[in-house]
Amino acid sequence: MLAVLSVASVCAQATTDVADLGWIAGHWAGPVGGASSEEHWIAPAASSMLGVSRTIARDRMVAFEFLRIEKRADGIYYVAQPGGRPPTAFKLTKSSANLAVFENPTHDHPKIITYELTDAKTLVATIEGDEGGKHVKQSFRFTRQ
């Protein structure tokens, strides 16, 4: 007898293998307000992925971030270091073949980071959390370069 799983039940679980997130790997770029942003992700190896991002406005780098996705004893984590600051970890809570949701409920903003591959050439990164007492949600649409 074959079991039928709904999309919700598949997404309710998180993978335990970083290799399953390999669809994030690549060079991605897109507009962010009046600036442009890009993320470069190295393919999974040794239960980890490395990434770097930068935002450029008027021929000047205005932001950068060191990123990694790594397997730990208690799960997979997205670790962000904006501006080279100390790392903040977000645990993978949901995933599917084209979706990864990372959460850190104790962090102010963001609390949730989502990556979704909407088609072979489009990656949407969404951050959401509390900012100034309000819930803020921002999406960034990247195109594979």
Image (spheres, helix red, strand yellow):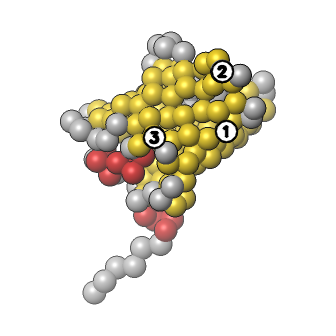
Image height of 92 relative to 20, above or below: above
User: Label 2: which residue?
Assistant: 59
How far apart in space, not on screen, are marks 3 and 1 (Cα)? Answer: 14 Å
Q: Where is residue 100 in the image (x, y as percent from the top left)?
A: 46, 48
Q: Where is residue 113 in the image (x, y as percent from the top left)?
A: 55, 39
Q: Is residue 135 visible?
A: yes
Outermost residue on the left side: it is 46
Judge the density around disc 3: few (<14), some (14-19), many (≥20) Cα neighbours within 10 Å. Answer: some
Q: Is residue 12 visible?
A: no
- Amino acid bearing label 3: His
Judge the density around disc 1: few (<14), some (14-19), many (≥20) Cα neighbours within 10 Å. Answer: some
Q: Is residue 33 left or right of residue 68?
A: right
How far apart in space, not on screen, are marks 2 and 1 (Cα)? Answer: 14 Å
Tag 3 secondary structure: strand
Number of numbered discs visible in the structure rendering? 3
Image height of 117 relative to 83, above or below: below
> Are circles 2 and 1 on residues that touch, CB within 8 Å?
no
User: Label 3: which residue?
Assistant: 27
User: Label 1: which residue?
Assistant: 31
Q: Is residue 23 left or right of residue 72?
A: right
Tag 1 secondary structure: strand
Please name the residue shown 29% across and 35% down the image: 48
| First along the sequence among labels 3 and 2 | 3
Q: In this orientation, which residue lies closer to the viewer: 87 or 141?
A: 141
| First along the sequence among labels 2 and 1 | 1
Tag 2 secondary structure: loop
Please name the residue shown 31% across and 83% down the image: 2
Outermost residue on the front side: it is 59
- Amino acid bearing label 1: Pro
